[in-house]
Amino acid sequence: MKKIGWIVLAILLLPSILNAKEGEVKIKIQGSTTVNPVISEAAEILRAERGWTIYVDTQGGSSGGISAVGEGFVDIGMISKPISEADRNKYASANFESFKIGIDGLALVVSQPVWDSGIQFLSKKQIQQLYERKILNWKELGGQDSKVVFYNKEPGRGTWEVFSNWAYGSYKNSPLVAHPEVGANEEAKNKVAFHNSAITQLSYAWAENSERIKAIGIQLPTGESVMPTKETIMSGEYPLSRSLFLVTNGKPTGYQKEFIDFILSDRGQELVKKYGYLSVR
Amino acid sequence: MGILVFVSSKAILSKPTFPFSVTGAFSLIFTLVSLLFFCGMALFLLIQGSPIFFQEQLSFITDADWFYRINQYGAASMIYGTILVSFLAIVLSLPFALGSAILTSEFLPNSIRVYVKSFIELLAGIPSVVYGLLGVLFLRPLIFKWFAPFSPESGDTLLTASVILAVMILPTVMSLSEDALRGVSKEHREVALSLGLTRLETFVHGVLPRAIPGIIAAVLLGLGRALGETIAVYLVIGRADNRLSDSLFSLKPLFEAGQTITSKLGGSELYIAYGEPTHWSAMIGLGLILFVFVGVIVAMGEAVNWLGRKYQHG
């Protein structure tokens, strides 16, 4: 009986012993679902080529990434908005270094039927009215007769912060609303796609080329309207563009630095483009 | 072998001998550690969660105005959502759970019974995120379509969450109720049958009344599970803050997005709260409320169960 016990124990412990030997390179990454596809594929590549172990997690979005880096739980954070003063104050002991790895547009996307009924661009004022529930039916904007359902990105998500900064000057001034909330990009996208009269804020790269959702244009104060496309985002003509970052606590060293260099290299930037974002070069 | 001997000789159990045997010492240590975990958790929730009760006082549980950016915390809509969703889940699952419990315990031959029961119990082993995803894929569109006359905003409603929860707690309620029904001793059935009662009458008058405490306990334990479920609810409830209808008995909120305590705690707001004492305390305060809810309900369940057993055997 005792012998069997020892054997069982040995079998149970074996993997952890083996693991300890080979797993020297371990990088933990957490944050934005917008940045995630690029980083996850890079992680796959480095795993295959260099045998690194890289964990990528999107719990909590950008604020999750900042918090995890600030507390030292992970090596690299992925964020889809610039680090703000508030973030720095909150983690006063941390010394955030951010690395711009790509550019993305932030699109307002509507369900296909809304687009088909004629809502193809909106002004900032109209978007504010939708957000504040002053416009409750698409009819008021010349569209179909159906309720407006605004899926708001959860506060704490980079997308929400970028949107609020644009619409209200600073996210701190954005009005207190009670919309249904969505978290990850996948969730936002699917919820609008499977709805007939919804709108949400979504990364442009995720809205591009997808069925059943459409990214609407923004009408500028001059009266002309700009559709989000790679060109307009690049030129800055489309007002809602943002940079994507990797962030570390202090100057990156060792494998941390190698990973960031890989993302900034030609191959890394190819991945950025592959997922619909704009390269930083 | 050792365990069998230990269990069968009741004398050892009732009169612990000194010095302790190794087995006894280990059991004692592990029990104490589990207890310590419980106390530590309760203490943590109390210490970190109490500041919000000093700031907001009763309005923390009576107001529906959770706006952390202006430092206002009222959790009423989440408490309401939690109670409504869990309660409705029980109401929805009870007929199915009880029905299958009665069928399996009373009317199925033993050879089939085992399979039916284990299949239903298998439902309990499915990870809750799978339930959530099934809800997203199938249930949300259905609810949106079927309840179109009530003009729901979308398929993410309190009702959707309740239906998912109902399926999730079905195995718990079914299995425990079935145990309760089978726990009624053979003599009661035989006496009833020998008096000329039909099988149905035997069940209704002889078996069911004696199993009631066990069934109540099953329901309460199911409710405890429903209260604490997070991810499945999170995926289908819509997560809209501060929706509280004017009338507590209005059915309208069922077809609207809402929030439960768990769906709030599962979101990314926890990361924003981290490091900001008041906001953090408000989040932990929510945890404390849930902890008390679940604690009371599970304790009630255990108490009813215990009383029931005492009544049956004593």
Image: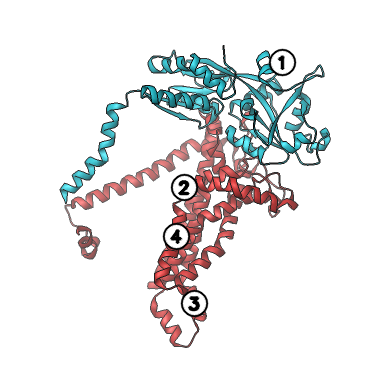
Chain colours: A cyan, B red
Estimate the x, y position of residue B63 in percent, counting from the top left: 65, 42
Q: Residue at x 79, y 35 (%)?
A: A135
Q: Which residue is mark 2?
A: B127
Contact between marks 2 and 1 (CB within 8 A): the answer is no
The Cα atoms of the two marked residues, 4 and 1, are separated by 60 Å
Q: Amino acid at mark 3?
A: Phe
Q: Amino acid at mark 4?
A: Phe
What element does badge 4 sit on?
A: helix
Q: Chain of mark 2?
A: B
Q: Which residue is mark 1?
A: A237
Whether A115 is drawn above or below B161: the answer is above
Q: Chain of mark 3?
A: B
Contact between marks 3 and 4 (CB within 8 A): the answer is no
- Could you confirm whether marks 2 and 4 are on the same chain? yes
Q: Residue at x 51, y 79 (%)?
A: B200
What element does badge 1 sit on?
A: loop
Q: Amino acid at mark 2?
A: Pro
Q: Which residue is mark 4?
A: B119
Q: Quadrant of the N terminus of chain B?
A: bottom left
Contact between marks 4 and 1 (CB within 8 A): the answer is no
What element does badge 3 sit on?
A: helix
Q: Callout 3 environment at 10 Å: few (<14), some (14 to 19), or many (20+)?
A: many
What element does badge 2 sit on?
A: loop
Estimate the x, y position of residue B306 in percent, counting from the top left: 41, 64
- The label nearer to you, 3 versus 2, is 2
Contact between marks 3 and 1 (CB within 8 A): the answer is no
Q: Which residue is mark 3?
A: B203
